Amino acid sequence: MEYIDMYLVHWPIKLKPWACNAVPKEEDFEMQLDMETTWEGMQKCLDRGLCRCIGVSNFSTKKIEHLLDFASVPPAVNQVEMHPMWRQRKLREICGKHDIHVSGYSPLGGPGNAWGSTAVVKNPLINSIALKHKATPAQVALKWGLTRGASVIVKSFNPDRLRENMGSLDLKLDDEDLIEIEQLQERKIMRGDFLVNNTTSPYKTLEELWDYEI
């Protein structure tokens, strides 16, 4: 490929150059983060035409604000976990203020993934709203994300599921639905435990990783 559309900093973490494990080992971490140098490199990729846009993923509001303190080019996107049970209200407000698009991964809660959960698609309220509109729970969850101004990233190779997901575009949630969803107890599913340890990671707790936004 001559270029890619979007290039993201996947996690706010620094690993040693030779680290290649999907789940980092304890010895893979670098203690000191250097986001300024990383972002400078991202901006060079943009300047050289290697990508059309640059962005981040799994950044808290505090990390977004820190990045904006020195970035010549702000991130176009912050890709984060977002679904009716983890609504990211504060983060969406901050990103919206700075024209950063929020893209929601695991908009169904990641069922089928080793770390995922069926809590979203099996939630009684989501199922009740689906029944009311003659839709599926997945369609309700996806439409909720779209109504919040986010894009939603769904992964399926099943033709029937693909059609079901596209059906969310035709669904209309009413004000009552949206108010009820806002009252759901929140639960983060992708917590990032594998990036936390007491010896080599810059984050000793999950609260530090997410800047107490969890």
Image: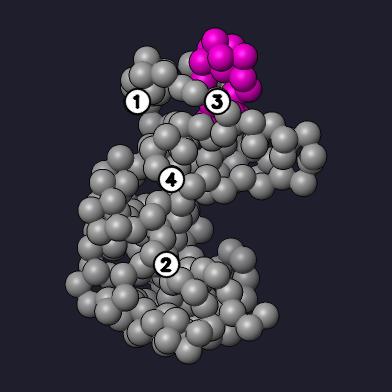
Stretch in magenta:
126-141
Of callouts 4 and 3, which one flags the residue occurring earlier in the amino acid sequence?
Answer: 4
Residue at 23 percent of width and 63 percent of height: 65
Residue at 36 percent of width and 19 percent of height: 175
Where does label 1 land, which residue? 182
Left or right: 123 with respect to 102?
A: right
Instruction: Name which residue type carries label 4.
Output: Ala
Of callouts 1 and 2, which one flags the residue occurring earlier in the amino acid sequence?
Answer: 2
Count of number-bearing discs = 4
Where does label 3 land, which residue? 171
CA gap between label 1 and label 4 equals: 16 Å
Query: With respect to residue 40, does 162 lie above or below?
Result: above
Of callouts 1 and 3, which one flags the residue occurring earlier in the amino acid sequence?
Answer: 3
Magenta highlight on residue 132: yes
Q: Residue 9 at x, y = what percent?
A: 45, 70
Whether residue 205 is visible to the viewer of this picture, yes or no, is: no
The secondary structure type at the circle numbered 4 is loop
Q: Disc 2 or disc 4, which is closer to the eye? A: 4
Determine which of the numbered discs, if any, sits on residue 55 in the image.
Answer: 2
Residue at 38 percent of width and 23 percent of height: 178
Q: Nearer the viewer, residue 67 or 144?
A: 144
Q: Quadrant of the N terminus?
A: bottom right
Where does label 4 land, which residue? 150
Q: Nearer the viewer, residue 135 or 79?
A: 135
